[in-house]
Amino acid sequence: MAHAPGWQSLMLLRCLTGFCLGGVLTLAYSLGGTLVSSEQRGAAFGWLALSVQVGTAASPLATGALAALSLPGVFLLDGGLAWAGAALLLLGARRLRRGAAS
């Protein structure tokens, strides 16, 4: 998206991103339900909800400040954070698979 040639392609890519990310919170709660014991689940989901709300509030501030300097930089930063999150999830999934196998 950082190098979209026009507003039409940017709109298409943003809609595709929104469509793909629409279920992320549901998947996070499902994963949390798998990882956290039932005794600690309420606290864990509370922390998850808090982090979502803080991120929702802080993201426009941070990306808005960055957009004042470089609009493509915003998309590159978001992409880098997405790749970092995917890597953390992949590493966590490998650990979960090893734990389930033993």
Image (cartoon, rainbow, N blue to C red):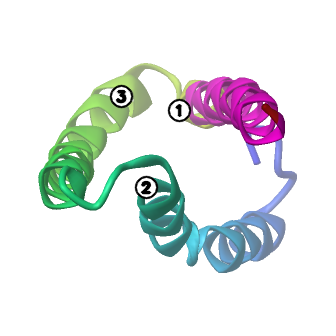
Mark-to-mark CA distance, 1 and 2: 29 Å
For the residues bearing labels 1 and 3, Cβ distance under 8 angstroms: no
Callout 2 secondary element: helix
Amino acid at circle 3: Ala
Q: Which residues are magenta?
A: 77-101
Residue visible at 31% across and 37% down? 64
Q: Nearer the viewer, residue 52 or 66?
A: 52
> Which quadrant of the view contains residue 12?
bottom right
Callout 1 secondary element: helix
> Is residue 61 positioned above or below 24 on the image?
above
What residue sits right under mark 1 in the picture?
74
What residue sits right under mark 3 in the picture?
68
What residue sits right under mark 2 in the picture?
32
Is 89 within the magenta?
A: yes
Q: Earlier in the sequence, mark 1 or mark 3?
A: 3
Amino acid at circle 2: Gly
Label 1 vs label 3, nearer the camera: 1
Residue visible at 51% across and 68% down? 30
Q: Is residue 76 left or right of residue 31?
A: right
Amino acid at circle 1: Val
